[in-house]
């Protein structure tokens, strides 16, 4: 950051600081991408492609739980195996590179947020700086919880449902590498972003834009609006996947309603006649 005080800095000084911040972020993400590129083959075999095999932990848990209670849908239990095929000559190489970048972004998320905080820190008040540590911790925690929910729960169930769905017995079921990776990255990474909703709500509450009364007033509207949004942007669009994505998103809405402040009560002064 520049040694000048914030009120003494010109537009070009701020622009120079922003450029330095973006350069540090790009350098860190670039180095992390190189590291992930070196280990991506092992990551593919042990993590990315793990949901395609029947020994994935969630499938084993479903099989064990189904023996005690027959409440699980048919597609959740039994043996499961997905054949991932490559139909484009250059897909494996480009997916190797793109996956390294996406994993680097997920790994670098705390560093990126911290660098952006350092950039805006001079413009914050002292009380806002005190709350920054807690916001930084919970923001990163929510992001990785969202990624974990996407990887360990949402993506495997989505894959299992769609891979087992059969329109005709004459259609041989297999999944292209491009289709598999686009769904995998969309579910895992964007669920991490979506889980930042409570942090965004808290921030808007701190600057007086959002209050708890808003959530109470528009709860019914939010329920149907979020359902429509999830239906539009879900990776597949089938009803089962839509509900899988909608439930955690709506839960985030309710959590956001708890972290925002109530609207200050305006006390009307009665006029006193003399």
Image (cartoon, grey):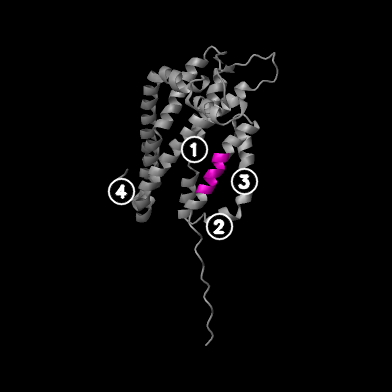
Residue 130 position, x and y percent, is 34, 52
For image coordinates 35% across by 49% down, the residue present is 122
Q: Reading the chain from its start, which is encountered first: label 3 or label 1? A: 1
Residue 169 position, x and y percent, is 69, 15
- From the image, state whether disc 4 or disc 2 is nearer to you: 2
Identify the residue under disc 1.
193
- From the image, state whether disc 4 or disc 1 is nearer to you: 1
Range of residues picked out in magenta: 247-255
Q: Reading the chain from its start, which is encountered first: label 4 or label 1? A: 4
Spatial CA span between label 4 and label 1: 34 Å
Of all residues shown, which one is farthest toward the left?
A: 3
Identify the residue under disc 4.
4
Identify the residue under disc 2.
213
Q: Is residue 230 above or below residue 44?
A: below
Q: Secondary structure at mark 1?
A: helix
Q: Reading the chain from its start, which is encountered first: label 4 or label 2? A: 4
- From the image, state whether disc 2 or disc 1 is nearer to you: 2
**Along the line of sight, the residue nearer the viewer: 199 or 98:** 199
Identify the residue under disc 3.
223
Q: Reading the chain from its start, which is encountered first: label 2 or label 1? A: 1
Spatial CA span between label 4 and label 2: 41 Å
For image coordinates 57% across by 28% down, the residue present is 158
| Mark 2 crowdedness (10 Å alpha carbons): few <14, some 14-19, many ≥20 | some
| Residue 120 left/right relative to 4 | right
Q: Secondary structure at mark 3?
A: helix
Q: Reading the chain from its start, which is encountered first: label 3 or label 2? A: 2
| Mark 4 crowdedness (10 Å alpha carbons): few <14, some 14-19, many ≥20 | few
């Amino acid at each position: 950051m520049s040694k000048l005080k914030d009120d003494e800095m010109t537009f070009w000084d701020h622009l120079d600081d922003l450029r330095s911040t973006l350069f540090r972020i790009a350098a860190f993400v670039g180095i992390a991408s190189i590291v992930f590129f070196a280990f991506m083959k092992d990551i593919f075999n042990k993590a990315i492609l793990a949901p395609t095999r029947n020994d994935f932990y969630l499938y084993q848990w479903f099989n064990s739980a189904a023996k005690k209670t027959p409440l699980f849908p048919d597609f959740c239990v039994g043996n499961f195996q997905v054949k991932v095929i490559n139909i484009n000559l250059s897909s494996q190489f480009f997916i190797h590179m793109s996956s390294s970048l996406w994993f680097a972004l997920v790994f670098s998320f705390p560093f990126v947020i911290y660098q952006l905080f350092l950039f805006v820190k001079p413009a914050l008040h002292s009380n806002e700086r005190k709350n920054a540590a807690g916001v930084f911790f919970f923001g990163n925690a929510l992001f990785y919880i969202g990624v974990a929910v996407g990887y360990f729960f949402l993506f495997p169930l989505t894959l299992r449902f769609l891979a087992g769905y059969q329109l005709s017995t004459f259609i041989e079921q297999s999944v292209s590498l491009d289709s598999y990776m686009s769904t995998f990255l969309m579910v895992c990474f964007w669920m991490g972003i979506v889980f930042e909703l409570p942090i965004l709500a808290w921030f808007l509450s701190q600057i007086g834009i959002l209050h708890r009364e808003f959530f109470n007033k528009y709860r019914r509207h939010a329920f149907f609006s979020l359902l429509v949004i999830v239906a539009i942007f879900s990776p597949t669009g089938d009803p089962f996947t839509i509900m899988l994505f909608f439930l955690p998103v709506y839960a985030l809405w309710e959590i956001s309603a708890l972290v925002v402040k109530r609207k200050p009560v305006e006390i009307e002064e009665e006029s006193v006649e003399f």
